[in-house]
Image (cartoon, rainbow, N blue to C red):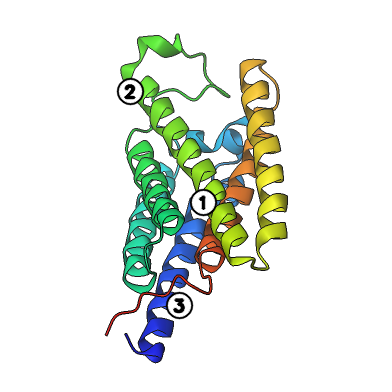
Amino acid sequence: MAPRQKTRYFWTAALLILLAAALYCSWPVGIWLNPGASRSGLASELGAFGQPYNWLFIWADIVSGALLVGGCLLLTRLFALTRWVRIGLVLLAVYGVCGALDAGLPLRCVPSIQICGPIFHDPQLVLHGVLDYIGSFALFGTLIAGWKVARQEDNVWLPWIYVVGTAGIIFALLSLIFIIDNGPGYWAQRYYLTISSIWVASLPFVLHGKSVYAKKA
């Protein structure tokens, strides 16, 4: 693959993933379009049945997932698939697929403004939660993969990985603790979503090491 073509592939993939990250972090739009659910609700409540503009948030996540998968496929043509590069791209694609499927199973009840029944009495809600956790674990896996690539390449992204990883883990745990303890989990989740989106947007550059270019004619 010619150097110019490599550059074009990389920036196309990076822009697709950047757009996907921006679409996934759509909660600030909810403050304007749906202030009721945004005041104290989780981001998933913006796409719940009956909520204003729920279609916008649902499709933002679905398109985001599709763009992530597309960006990962492009990067497989550019990067030589070393073990950790391959793992990082596969996990990023899994994260995108889970986000899209999760959005396709919108909540039927909005806990912040309605009284909802037991979680385990709603199979769709259980599946919604399972996909959410699988996506989160996949995202955490991309952090490990990025760290391994950065360590092997001795590149400048290593401090960035520590900062983003630490912040993401802290807000993920705070979000979980507050949700279980009926605390203000919505604000911790928003910080977590924002940090996650920033990390996703940076991942193509983290994996852009000295030895990962595909040597193709």
Of residue 177 and residue 204, the one placed in the foreground of this image is 204
Quadrant showing the C terminus: bottom left
Q: Nearer the viewer, mark 3 or mark 1?
A: 1
Decide: marks 1, 2 in contact (CB < 8 A)?
A: no
Q: Which residue is mark 3?
A: 11
Work out which residue is located at the far left of the displayed protein and give it: 217
Q: Sequence-wise, which precedes: disc 3 or disc 1?
A: 3
Q: Sequence-wise, which precedes: disc 3 or disc 2?
A: 3
In this figure, what is the number of numbered marks? 3
Q: Which residue is mark 2?
A: 124
Q: Using residue 24 as the reference point, say whether residue 105 is left or right of it.
A: left
Decide: marks 3, 2 in contact (CB < 8 A)?
A: no
Label at residue 145: 1
SS at mark 2 in the image: helix
SS at mark 3 in the image: helix
- Indicate the quadrant where residue 169 lies: top right
Residue 210: % across, % down: 53, 74
Residue 133: % across, % down: 46, 31
Residue at 51% across, 51% down: 145
Give the amino acid type for the residue marked by disc 3 in the picture.
Trp
Q: Is residue 126 above or below residue 35?
A: above
Give the amino acid type for the residue marked by disc 1 in the picture.
Ala
Of residue 19 and residue 112, the one placed in the foreground of this image is 19
Disc 3 to disc 2, C-alpha distance: 38 Å
